[in-house]
Every structure is written in structure tokens, then in C-alpha cells.
Amino acid sequence: MTVEQLCLSVLYEGEATGYDIRRHFSEGEAALFADASIGAIYPALAKLEAKGLVDFVNQEQIGKPNRKIYHITEAGREAFLAALREPLSKDKCQSSFLYFLRFAHLAPPDIVVTHMEVRRRQLAQEVDRLEKFLLRPTNNPQGRWVLEYGLAMIKAKQANLDTIARKIGSTLGANCHAI
Amino acid sequence: MTVEQLCLSVLYEGEATGYDIRRHFSEGEAALFADASIGAIYPALAKLEAKGLVDFVNQEQIGKPNRKIYHITEAGREAFLAALREPLSKDKCQSSFLYFLRFAHLAPPDIVVTHMEVRRRQLAQEVDRLEKFLLRPTNNPQGRWVLEYGLAMIKAKQANLDTIARKIGSTLGANCHAI
DNA sequence: ACTTGCATGTAAGTGGTTACATGATTGG
DNA sequence: CCAATCATGTAACCACTTACATGCAAGT
């Protein structure tokens, strides 16, 4: 799952600019399983073009910057399908929130409360976002699976957060080592 | 969540060698929210020692290599607590499995089936592992929260996998573009 | 005989991130 | 008037991964 492969995967399903691809991984459904920053996407697209896996058309716009609209080539399709047959690397997840929670008894209670509230808000927002995606009728089955997976994860996180929130009062009150 | 901070967090709760710390993030509960490779841990410990945040005792063993047993210093404790007050970076998750699933209709059906089976086995294994951890009576409340969180996530993943497995036969059979 | 576990460490290479540069338009 | 959105790109920097080097003991 390098940025190059991720770009190819987006272009497999349709034309896009670097900027479009970025949005895919920040706001789109692809954000559920990967990330790609804008500073990584542009060099990746340049490399893909050098390899002949993608090409682009320059589109001039009035009042807006030019866009390079990228398309996957036949060689690109083949490369993508070939990559899909390779063994999967193991999933990684890195949660600063969970790390914090693990040592919550060492942090000032007000910070704990703030982090919990922020988390709650973020999760609710994410549920909204995904449910809107699911309402759109154009999703293919695979896209829906991913969205449903994401939604299930977030709802499990919400349930967990509630459980912890209930426990946290007594525990933190009792043996808080923080200032 | 740099490797240095992760090392500090482990040493805050007790002495450990670099090797011990590695196990913490590969087999321990900390694996649920972070990762740190052995090649990153040793340099991190050296830097922490240079900063005076940790120190170590050399322990010679018979029939086994020497161990450097690291301890956190008072300055180290302060640095760790200070870091705990800083804003949280957002959680990242990268799932090759989900990426594959998103494009499963383009992969040969036998590969899809294999990946699903491997996934099922991995999830079951992880449930076992976490449940054993939860049986141990020595966990502090925060440790238990993390474990329960991890368990809830995996069970949600299992439920989801079952749902998809049921759907996958019809969908893949109908519009498989793969060879 | 071979692999795995224990245990430390280095060094080359990679695959990013972050910040910067540019610039017009739209909205608060 | 300032920030954000659209849009591309570069370059310095960074943290980490991977592979290697070493070596003994115990299990298969």
C-alpha cells in the first residue's frame, strides 16, 4: 500500500487530479483504510507517468488553476491487477487516544474529560459522514462493504466510549496521581 | 507517539530491556494502539539515556546474552507526564485487508477466499490472546479498558466478516471481472 | 542440522511529512 | 481583510524499516 498503488487504485475507477485523489483519502471512503498526503501524491503521480502506468490531460480553467486530469493506461490496469494478487501486509493501527487512555490516571482530570468529549464529537461526526455516503445509490457492493465496516467500527467505539465514561468518574476520583 | 515516547511509557510502569519493550508492542496489550520495531527501539533508548530520561544496569547472564535493564529517571517521569498533557494527534489506521476488499471484484476468487480465511483465523487468534490477558488479575483499570476496547473492535470485525462472507458468493459470482 | 528465542546493535535506504512557493476566487 | 478552497509542485528533513552482524542455548 504505497502512495503509488493508492493513486492507481483511485484512477482505476475513474479520472482524477492529484487534488481529487487527496480528497479521496481525507474525506472519501478510502480514508477508512488508508491515507495519502498531498506532498506524497504529486511525486507518486509523476513516477507513475514516467512508468507509463498513467497519463494526463492539461485542463485550463478560468479563475482557477490549471488541472492535470490523470487517466490510467492499459499498462496501469495490468499493474494494478497484478498487485492485487500479492500477499497482504498486516493491518496497522495507531491510536493516540487509546495511548492516552492507557495512562489517563496520570493526566489532569480536566484534560481527560476534554479528550473524551472531543472523541465523542469526532465519532458522531464520522457516523454522520458515513451514513450520508451510504445513502447514495451509486456505490458498488465493495464500496458499501467498506462503508458498513467503517460504520460498525465507529459504533463499537462509541459503545466503548460510553462504558469507559461511566467507569472513569469513580476510577479517576479514587487513584489519580496527577496534579 | 514517537518510539522514544513509547519507550518512556513502558519504562514508566517498570524496568525493561529493549527486547522486552519490543515484545510489549508486538505481543503485549500496547500492540493494540501502537507499534515499535526493534531497529527503532535501541536508538530511541540510547537517545533517552543521552537526555538523562532513563538509565540502565548491565546484567550478565550465563548462557544468554547480556541485558541492559533500563529504568526511568525522575526527569524521565516528568517528561512523560508533560507529554501526556499535549494535544492528541489523530488516529491512523491502515488496512491492507480493507483495501483488498474494496477491489475484491477484480481479484481471482480463490485469492479472495484465501484472504478471507486467513483473516478469520487471525481474528480468532487475537480474541484468544486478548481474553487470556483479561483473565490475569493484575491489570490496572486503564489496562483493562484498552483490552476491552481491543476485544470489542475484533468482535465487531468478526461480525462484519461473517456478513460479507455471506454476501460475497452471489456478488463475486455475478460480476467478477477477474481472470 | 536447522530453526527459534534471547539479546544487542548499526547502517543504508525508503517512504513518507511538513513547510514553503505561487496565485486567483469566494465567502465570512 | 482574512481565511479557505482550488491546484500544482519542490525540497529539506525525519522517523522508521529492513537487513545485516554476532553469538549462545534449547528445542525439533
Image: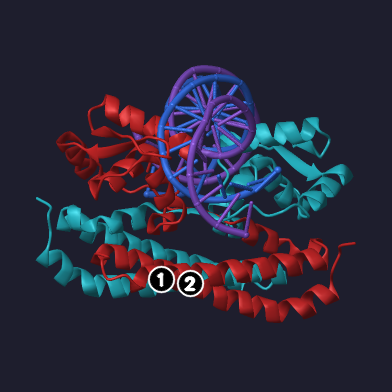
Chain colours: A red, B cyan, C purple, D blue
Inspect the image, locate mark 1, and give the three-letter code of the amino acid beneath it: Lys
Is C26 positioned to the left or the right of B52 in the image? left
Occupied quadrant, residue A135: bottom left
Occupied quadrant, residue A59: top left
Inspect the image, locate mark 2, and give the three-letter code of the amino acid beneath it: Asp
Marks 1 and 2: in contact by CB < 8 Å?
A: yes
Residue A22, x across and y down, in percent: 43, 45
Is A74 positioned to the left or the right of C16 in the image? left
Label 2 crowd bin: few (<14), some (14–19), many (20+), radius 10 Å? few
Residue B3, x across and y down, in percent: 64, 42
Residue B43, x across and y down, in percent: 66, 31
Question: Taking B72 as reference, is A43 above or below it?
Answer: above
Q: Residue at x 66, y 66 (%)?
A: A118
Residue to which mark 1 is pinned: A132
Residue B77, x across and y down, in percent: 83, 49
Residue B49 visible in the current orientation:
yes
Residue to which mark 2 is pinned: A128
Q: Residue at x 63, y 61 (%)?
A: A98
Q: Name the element at disc 1.
A: helix
**Chain of the residue where label 2 is placed in the rendered structure:** A
Label 1 crowd bin: few (<14), some (14–19), many (20+), radius 10 Å? few
Question: Taking B33 as reference, is B63 above or below it?
Answer: above
Which of the two residues, B135 or A95, is positioned nearer the viewer here? A95
Q: Residue at x 21, y 37 (%)?
A: A76
Is A58 positioned to the left or the right of A121 in the image? left
**Chain of the residue where label 1 is placed in the rendered structure:** A
Which of the two residues, C8 or A66, is positioned nearer the viewer here? A66
Question: Taking B82 as reference, is A153 above or below it?
Answer: below
Question: Taking B171 as reference, is B41 above or below it?
Answer: above
Numbered badge on residue A66: none
